[in-house]
Amino acid sequence: PSRAHAQVFDGGGSNEVEGRTRPGSQSLQLYDVVELAQHFGVSRISALYRLRNLRLLTEGEFERLKALDEAGQGKRVASLLGYGDLEDSEGRDRFRHRFLTLAFETHRRDEISRSKLDELSKLVGLNPSEIDALLSEGALFDESLGVLAAQ
């Protein structure tokens, strides 16, 4: 995976070229995790677990980065980079937006029930009656397209 392959055209034809990155140049650092978490609107610990599950981090790298974050270093790096923590209102709003969008889409695809959508919505402070109103007005799902609406 560290090898880059390319075909280079030199006027007379193409040549295969292969290169490798410098050893150690691909290791993830805490600031990478902070950037990733910020970009996707998730917590740093969620980003770490996802990276480990994708096998982009070894168990040792995961434990090292997790320990740094638990010691408060992740928060310090986020602050240094000008990012707030998910506990701040902007981070909470971004997370809430992404969470609800995913919940609505999963329900629209009939992968979760309406009761599960209500349960998830309550986790971020949304009243199920607000969802009822939007569903009955067709504001969440367009029934004419044959997608799931209120059950």
Image (tube, rainbow, N blue to C red):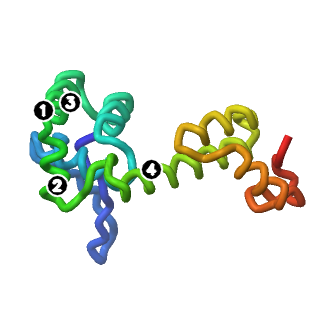
At label 1, the amino acid type is Ala
- Secondary structure at badge 4 equals helix
* Contact between labelled residues 1 and 3, with CB atoms less than 8 Å apart: no
**Mark 2 → mark 3, Cα distance in angstroms:** 17 Å
Q: Residues within 10 Å of mark 4 (few under 14, many from 20)?
A: many
- Point 29% across, 66% down: residue: 8
Q: Nearer the viewer, mark 3 or mark 4?
A: 4
Q: Quadrant of the C terminus?
A: top right
* Contact between labelled residues 4 and 3, with CB atoms less than 8 Å apart: no
Sequence-first tag of 2 and 3: 3
State the residue position of label 3.
66
Pinpoint residue 130: horizontal percent, then vertical percent: 70, 52
Q: Which mark is residue 71?
A: 1
Q: Residues within 10 Å of mark 2 (few under 14, many from 20)?
A: few
- Secondary structure at badge 1 equals loop
Is 147 displayed left or right of 21 in the figure?
A: right
* Contact between labelled residues 1 and 4, with CB atoms less than 8 Å apart: no
**Mark 4 → mark 1, Cα distance in angstroms:** 23 Å
Q: Which mark is residue 79?
A: 2
- Point 12% across, 40% down: residue: 73
**Mark 3 → mark 1, Cα distance in angstroms:** 9 Å
At label 3, the amino acid type is Lys
Above or below: residue 69 compared with residue 13: above
State the residue position of label 4.
95
Q: Nearer the viewer, residue 98 or 3?
A: 98
At label 4, the amino acid type is Phe
